[in-house]
Amino acid sequence: MLKMVNKEMIMNINKIGAGIVTFNPDKKRVCEVIDAILIQVSEVVIVDNGSDVDINWLKEIYTNQIYIIKNIKNVGIARALNQIMEYFNNKSFEWVMTLDQDSILTENAINHLLKFSSNNVAIICPRIIHDDEIAVDEKENEKIERTITSGSLTNVVKWDNIGGFDEDLFIDMVDFDFCERIKLNGYEIIRVNSVRINHQYGDAAIKNFFGKKIGVYNYSPFRRYYITRNNIIFYKKYSNIGNFKIMVKEIVRNVGKVVLYEDNKLKKINAITKGMKDGISWKKI
């Protein structure tokens, strides 16, 4: 299953690690993710966030090639990401590639991303594409405002300098919050458009609303709560960006999608309502 490559042919990877956060992963897909990254870094860490089933079967496939951190319960994506970064920080690694359990990195991607590293860069990321999207970019690389954690190559020292990922957010907006603090600390995020990674949105569907295509992601009530709560918290934390109208418009749009297209409507609307209350009552410590 594992594609063997002579690591001497790749740029010095002794201080480059990778971390994958899993939750009830599909066996075939997660192995494809591991196979693709294992030949590009010196060490891979899996943080399992409270899966319902034991994932020790991965050890049988990869023996000593990966290290597994098993959380008894779901401690949130922010905590899992910090566990990955803490592991590599303790081993004095320089960069860490973070991946979702279904995001497959292309061959030699990290080698190419690292060509654009500099003293002021905190994250180097690929161009994110969705499903059958065809991305056309004029620039090979460019400075951007924000990116998602999946596919991001993060500098370990700079992660530590800005205080890591905000675990209070648990899930949703964790990546954008991290990116905002990167900028506030004077660091940069560089996107390399010539490197691509496909990112999928779970149980997504495209609906037609009076001729306009709308993405409907069928998030659970649990996710609807955190999406709403954390959007409000984000704008309260960084009141210098965006505006209140954008936040309200997003919440109204999400309510509309639930009402028009999704199932379990009452539980999701209640979750959104609770998320609004908790987000409004949140106070910065």
Image (cartoon, rainbow, N blue to C red):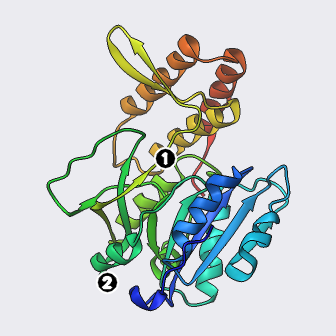
For label 2, count other residues whose C-alpha is less than 10 Å away and answer few (under 14), some (14-19) or many (20+).
few
In the rendered structure, the answer to whether residue 33 lies left or right of residue 111 reads right
Quadrant where the image shows the N terminus: bottom right
Relative to 98, does residue 218 appear above or below in the rendering? above
Instruction: Give me the residue at 42% from left, 40% from top.
Output: 131
Relative to 181, does residue 283 appear above or below in the rendering? above
Instruction: Give me the residue at 80% from left, 61% from top.
Output: 55
Which of the marked residues, 1 or 2, is nearer the chain's N terminus?
A: 2
Q: Secondary structure at mark 2?
A: loop
Q: Secondary structure at mark 1?
A: helix
Residue 3 visible in the current orientation:
yes
Relative to 250, does residue 207 appear above or below in the rendering? above
Across and down, in percent, residue 109 comes to: 38, 69
**Whole-number angstrom distance, CA of label 1 to CA of label 2:** 28 Å
In the rendered structure, the answer to whether residue 48 lies left or right of residue 87 reads right
Quadrant where the image shows the C terminus: bottom right
Residues under numbered marks 1 and 2 in contact, where contact means CB atoms less than 8 Å apart: no
The residue where tag 1 is placed is 234
Instruction: Give me the residue at 29% from left, 81% from top.
Output: 118
Residue type of the residue flagged with mark 2: Asn
> Can you tell which of label 1 and label 2 is closer to the viewer?
2
Q: Quadrant of residue 158?
A: bottom left
10 or 101: which is nearer to us?
A: 10
For label 1, count other residues whose C-alpha is less than 10 Å away and answer few (under 14), some (14-19) or many (20+).
some
Residue type of the residue flagged with mark 1: Phe
The residue where tag 2 is placed is 119
Q: How many marks?
A: 2
153 or 101: which is nearer to us?
A: 101
Across and down, in percent, residue 263 comes to: 66, 17
- Which residue is most to the left? 138
Instruction: Give me the residue at 52% from left, 48% from top.
Output: 173
